Image (cartoon, rainbow, N blue to C red):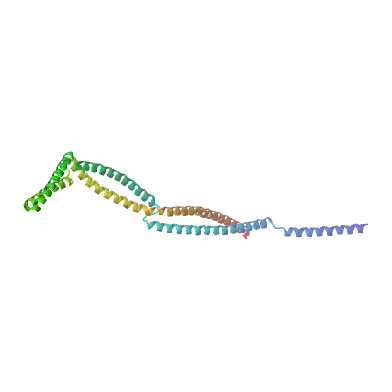
Amino acid sequence: MSNKWLWVGCGLIVMVSGMGQVAHGQVATVPSPEQASTSAVKRQVAVIENSIADTQDRLEHSKMIIRKFEEQVANLGEQLAAFNVSEVSYPEVLMQLQVQRINLSIEKAGLDAKAEKLAELVSKERQPSEKNEQKRAKLQEILALEEQGLQRLNELHQSGVVPTSELLEGRKRIIQVELQLLELDSPQPSTSPEAVWAADMLAKIALDRVENMAKLAAIDELLRPLQHVRPTLSEMQNLKNEIETWQAEKSQMQTRQMELQDRLRDLKFKLDEVDSPDK
């Protein structure tokens, strides 16, 4: 019996010894906490480095788009320069021209009203008076009588009764009456102080109206091309809005890039501490 239990004891010792060796082998394959932490940090480093690369790509893309839009804005600025305006000066130039046109239009209305009133005063002075009309009627009556007398003298002259000198005298009297009628029909100079003043003012206003119309024509000539500038300004503003959007994207990517680089620097510092021989 003693030998049997001896063998049993030896077997148990061998079994326990083998299990101990197996257990010892399994513990050797499990990484230590330091190794697990290092692996985790390395994985984080890889992820952050990929994020930095992606962020850099997006940042470069933003810069490229911004440069493209800025070139387009510069080209549109050159187009505006052809009209002697810029994006900044255009509203002021347009407003000044429009204000001047309004003022000149108001001034023209005043000049037209003055000219009309003065013309009425001058015309009233030059209208035939009742006395002149009576004189005209008398002269026309005399003219008719003289023409009848001349016709009679012409008949007598042909018969040899009346000499040529008398016939010529009759013709002379007719010419004198016709001259008086012509003088009566010709415009009479203004004689009253009011009429003289109105005539002088009318002449001055006529020159003012010519100047006014010339200024209006010049302003219209300047305003006409500015109407074609509006679409260019609208396009330029749209481009600047796009640039602002992409500038915000660029700023966001730059901020993210710095944050990622700071995080990467901290992780690498942690790896250096783990791998340091002094640790």
Q: What is the quadrant of residue 195 in the picture?
A: top left
Q: Nearer the viewer, residue 63 or 26?
A: 63
> How many numbered marks are there?
0
Q: Position of residue 3 (x, y in %)?
A: 91, 59
Quadrant assignment for the C terminus: bottom right
Q: Nearer the viewer, residue 121 or 262?
A: 121
Left or right placement of residue 48 versus residue 12 in this view: left
Residue in the picture at 24% in, 46% down: 205
The answer to whether one can see residue 116 in this image is yes
Instruction: Examine the image and state in which quarter residue 47 appears.
Output: bottom right
Where is residue 251 drawn, in percent x and y? 51, 54
Tell me residue 212's x, y (percent). Answer: 28, 49
Q: Residue furthest right?
A: 1
Residue plotted at (90% across, 57% down): 5
* Of the pair 233 and 40, the residue shown nearer to us: 233
Please name whichever residue, 232 or 270, is drawn nearer the observer in this view of the structure: 232
Tell me if residue 279 can be seen.
no
Q: Quadrant of the N terminus?
A: bottom right
**Which residue is drawn at the image coordinates 36% and 52% (left, top)?**
223
Residue that protrudes farthest toward the top in the picture: 130
Compared across the picture, whether 231 is left or right of 180 comes to: right
Q: Position of residue 227 (x, y in %)?
A: 39, 52
In the image, taking residue 38 as reference, residue 12 lies left or right, namely right
The residue drawn where x is 20% and y is 44% is: 199
